[in-house]
Amino acid sequence: MAKKAEKLAKAARLRCEKWQTYFAQNIDQYHRMHGFVLGKQWNNEEEDMLTSFNKVPLQFNKLATLVNTLLGEQQQNTPMLEVVPLSGCDEETANIRQLITKDIMLSNDAKTVYQVAAAQAFVGGFGAYYLSTDYTHPKSFDLDIKYCHFKDATRAYWDIGAEQVNKIDGMYCGYVSRMTRKKFRQMYGKEIESKILDSNAPPSEEEIAEVVAPQSDGNGFVWADSEGICILNDYTRKYEEETLYKMSNGKILNQEEMDALIESSKEIRAKIQQEQMMAHMMDALMGPEMGAEMGQQVPLEPTQEMDDDIMTLYDEGQPVRIEDRKESKKSIMIHRQFAGDFLLDETEFPSEDCPVIFVDQNSFYDKEGKQVCRPFIIDAVDAQRYLNYLGTQSAFILKISRYDQFIGSKKNAQSLDTQNAWKDPQSIKGLLTYDESPSGAKPEQIRPPELSVSLTQQYQRAIDDMYTSTGLYPTRLGQGDGEASGVAIDARTRQGSYTTYVAFNSINRAITAGGKILNQMIPRVYDTERTITLMTAEEGRKDVVVNQQQDSYSGIIKNDLSKGTFEVRLQAGPSYEGQKAQALESLNMVLQGNPQIFNLIADLYSENLPLMNTLEIKNRLKTLVPPEILEAGKSGQMPEDQKPPTPEEQAAMADIQYKQQQIEIKKQELELKMQEAKARNEQAMLELEMKRLEVLGEIETQKLRYMAETDRTRSDNAISHADNITKILTAKIGQQDDGRSKRDR
């Protein structure tokens, strides 16, 4: 077992290092670009050169502002996931699944996770986040789904053969986390810690060949040192054969679900047989008329409609049959945790695809087939460097502008005091003395250089180049650029939106990929009957029971999260602030001419307000909108009660009112007749009561006989059914009583 674990650990480490080697260029760029944006915009050689010329290397970091603008817009316009049912799910269950999705995102602050990944991608060219599971609290056995971010996206790895942009279709993925030695000792023990430190050595060529993995070139991590130990979380895909069944009610069942359906159908068949037996017994006891009535209450087995090679199946109390079957492959993700050569944990992860999502910015593949990542700000780096050069030179000119210089003969500076004054004219105050030369020449003063107009223009050009390369113009940064026209500002904003659309679309693809994984995890994590507290717009916080067993007879499960197929979509697109502003302006123009329609569009108006607490404002304004208008907005049709009635409808309504009046008159006459017949029926009621008691006594006798012949389970079902028969007999006697009363009248 230890050998197998050691082999798995080495294979996982080599997969990680394989990605590190393949992605080395992008990883280096990731760290370099993050360092540049965070403030390290001069290399050591440049700093030494400037210092030698008495120049201070200055930085005018505009890139950080551009990145923050992008992140702010992305955070403000982060779309929510929408789970759309495709088939096999009722409306209530689909709504609960949507609420669960929303609750998971809100409780885990998914917007922050997206923002961290977006920042990594904007600056470094790629980012990452992942989904995990954890217990609701330490004393709970229920799992919850977690959204998690990476402090450093280079700590994640993927299958280089993955074809999808976000690499969730790869055969493996994973990430490396670092743990202090103290915490590791507390969790796993000092013995394992010591063995890991002793075995922290690269694998030999024989070991590499044994696990059939490429040799690392040394670009991997330091897996253990005196400060901490790396934990390798590895997710590996495997396939298992499975049989799928297509049922007559449209559902697709796997073998596990089919086995459960067969077991529940056995119970239902046994109960049906008991009910049929009781029905035949009561038919013999009460006569053909009563037996026929009892037969109508018992579902009969439609055996002729079923396949000959399988028994009758019942899904949610209804008979179903197998229409088709096929062999398929089931994807399973195995999650293993390693430290050194030790396998710390191994579980089946509740998803079909890789839960570590690669967030691509705008990459391409070179002629060698290697992926090359392009950060959003990559084209603005040279402009930023040029800006730093210009700013440094301008500062140097300003620095030396206070130093006056002189040119004179040697006679002018014979004395030591005069020489020192000429070296630093600013050190003296007032008079600069000099010795007269035989020729009578005076020292000539040289004025310091001034900032040229060309230098100022180049500085502004560098800033403009940063704007044009990113599409983030001053109007989008909250600055004015001389454009007084609102149309011009809107045009510039839309132009910037087009430039940044690719960046935001890449982030949204990653959000959708994570939503797909989340949709796979929900039925696997919430797989038992449990109560979940969810937030709803109408009722606020409420408790919902999922996977609730209604009764053992029908097999119906309320809010069954395992049923149905779903599709994940985004509720809003990227970078739509400009569109919202335009919509708000258009709505204001409409309301100026027609203020009375505000109550009809109050909720829509609030959605475009650039204010905090927009959701709360929308919910309050929504109360101003008539409910029928809200319903019409959802259905796209005007409510029937809002349409004026046609002449035919008016005539029909008048006829209905007349008939209702006649019925009311007849009801009053009937009540008088019933009071007159009440006295005459008392004797007949006594006779019927005696007959009813005789029948009930015979039924109780049959119960005792049947209980002696069957087991406890079947006898309970028989008693329950006999009670139902009692109710039917009572109703039958009541019908006879009514018939006699009518004959008396």
Image (spheres, rainbow, N blue to C red):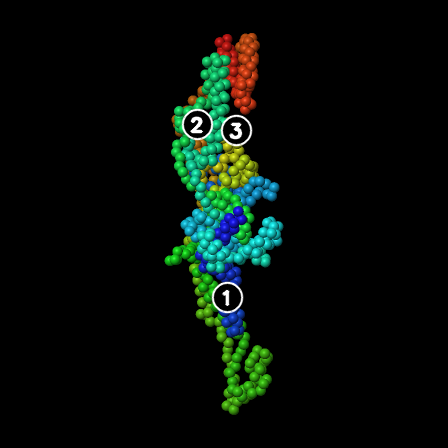
Is label 1 in a helix, a strand or a loop?
loop
Nearer the viewer's eye, disc 3 or disc 2?
A: 2
Nearer-N-terminus badge (3/2): 2
Position of residue 250 relative to residue 385, above or below, is above
User: Do tag 1 and tag 3 residues touch (Cβ < 8 Å)?
Assistant: no
Nearer-N-terminus badge (1/3): 1
State how far apart marks 3 and 2 are (Cα).
22 Å
| Residue ID for mark 3 | 551
State how far apart marks 2 and 1 are (Cα).
79 Å
Q: Amino acid at mark 2?
A: Met
Q: Amino acid at mark 3?
A: Asp
Please tell me how crowded label 2 is: few (under 14), some (14-19), or many (20+) other residues with Cα within 10 Å.
Answer: some
Q: Which disc number belongs to residue 311?
A: 2
Q: Position of residue 94 (x, y in %)?
A: 48, 37
Tell me how many marks there are. Answer: 3
User: Could you tell me if residue 403 is visible in this image?
Assistant: yes
| Residue ID for mark 1 | 42
Q: Amino acid at mark 1?
A: Trp
State how far apart marks 1 and 3 are (Cα).
72 Å
Residue under the point 52% across and 91% down: 438
Q: Position of residue 685 (x, y in %)?
A: 55, 11
Toward the left, the furthest residue is: 367
Position of residue 45 relative to residue 726, above or below, is below
Q: Which disc number belongs to residue 285?
A: none
Residue under the point 52% across and 53% down: 176
Nearer the viewer's eye, disc 2 or disc 1?
A: 2
Is label 3 in a helix, a strand or a loop?
loop
Q: Nearer the viewer, residue 461 or 147?
A: 147
Q: Position of residue 645 (x, y in %)?
A: 42, 29
Toward the bottom, the furthest residue is: 438
Position of residue 96 relative to residue 478, above or below, is above
